[in-house]
Image (cartoon, grey):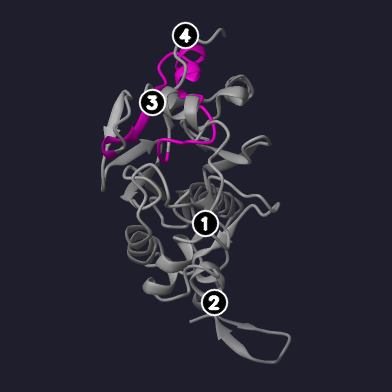
């Protein structure tokens, strides 16, 4: 057996040393690079904002397949959204609403015209029209990713929370806002139902799951399940206290409700000019 004398004075057998020929080294480095590339995340999220109704629109895409989904688009910013999709070279498969909104008209109808192949999505329980009507457990797949629909009624009968397949993100619509929640005094609202929805369908997600709401009125953009479980001033109360609080908010009606809801029941204004 051959031995090698190390600078330390130790003798070690040559077979114990992991020397590689230049060819072997290149092969190993290539394998490591391929493994790193396979482990690189291929998903991307864009957060967009409409200032009149303070609505967040979310664009999610698989960068490898270019397949994408848009959540809660607004009519007035639909052209902006379509231009971004084209600019990024994405294939928008779905324009999905978390519920039938009362404070703005959805952009799904217009987006379908501007981006052929895009299909509108909303909860079957909303009573609205769309290309795809979904319920609890339905998955919207785009590339290697999927959004799982969780039924979270209470703000309206047809509220959905979309949870990313790896449970790192949840798009909660108006069911759960940052340090707040949607109102429950119109559109089949129920404070008790909303409380159960949030606690059973959202607060049971991993604590570090990111919460992306449909609206924010204070400039905040993201929270986590842990933050809202412990810091949300409404939903950390008992169910009885929550119901009493919600029943006494005395909020004014949304300014656009009289024309937004009828339009949203038809998936937005289908005949708007492009």
Label 4 – label 3 distance at C-alpha:
15 Å
Residue holding disc 4: 271
The residue sitting at 40% across, 41% down in the picture is 144
Residue holding disc 3: 120
The part of the chain drawn in magenta is 98-125
The residue mark sitting in front, 1 or 2, is 1
Q: Is residue 122 magenta?
A: yes
Residue holding disc 2: 14
Circle 3 SS class: strand
Label 1 – label 4 distance at C-alpha:
34 Å
**Is any atom of residue 233 visible in this view?**
yes
Relative to residue 171, is residue 108 depicted above or below? Answer: above
Which class describes the residues within 10 Å of circle 3: few (<14), some (14-19), or many (20+)?
Answer: many
Relative to residue 243, is residue 105 depicted above or below? Answer: above
Residue holding disc 1: 211
The residue mark sitting in front, 4 or 2, is 4
Q: Is residue 170 left or right of residue 179?
A: left
Looking at the picture, how far across and down is residue 209, in whole percent? 49, 62
Q: Name the N-terminal-most of marks 1 and 2.
A: 2
User: Contact (CB < 8 A) between labels 4 and 2?
Assistant: no
**Is any atom of residue 88 visible in this view?**
no
User: Contact (CB < 8 A) between labels 1 and 4?
Assistant: no
Q: In this orientation, which residue lies closer to the viewer: 72 or 140?
A: 72
Looking at the picture, how far across and down is residue 105, in whole percent? 51, 27
């Amino acid at each position: 057996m051959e031995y090698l004398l190390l600078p330390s004075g130790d003798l070690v057998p040559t077979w114990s040393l992991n020397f590689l020929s230049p060819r072997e080294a290149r092969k190993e480095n290539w394998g490591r690079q391929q493994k790193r590339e396979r482990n690189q995340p291929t998903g991307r999220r864009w957060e967009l904002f409409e200032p009149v109704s303070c609505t967040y629109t979310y664009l999610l895409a698989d960068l490898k397949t270019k397949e994408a989904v848009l959540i809660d688009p607004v009519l007035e910013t639909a052209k902006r959204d379509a231009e971004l999709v084209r600019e990024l070279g994405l294939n928008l498969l779905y324009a999905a609403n978390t519920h039938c909104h009362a404070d703005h008209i959805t952009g799904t109808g217009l987006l379908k015209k501007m981006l052929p192949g895009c299909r509108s999505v909303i909860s079957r329980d909303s009573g609205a029209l769309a290309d795809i009507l979904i319920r609890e457990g339905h998955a919207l797949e785009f590339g290697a990713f999927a959004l799982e629909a969780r039924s979270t009624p209470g703000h309206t009968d047809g509220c959905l929370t979309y949870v990313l397949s790896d449970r790192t993100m949840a798009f909660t619509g108006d069911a759960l806002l940052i340090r707040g929640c949607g109102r429950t005094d119109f559109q089949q609202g129920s404070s008790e139902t909303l409380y159960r929805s949030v606690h059973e369908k959202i607060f049971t997600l991993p604590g570090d799951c990111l919460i992306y709401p449909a609206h924010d009125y204070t400039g905040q953009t993201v929270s986590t399940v842990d933050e809202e479980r412990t810091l949300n001033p409404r939903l950390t109360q008992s169910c009885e206290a929550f119901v009493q609080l919600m029943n006494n908010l005395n909020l004014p009606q949304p300014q656009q409700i009289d024309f937004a809801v009828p339009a949203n029941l038809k998936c937005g204004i289908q005949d708007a000019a492009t």
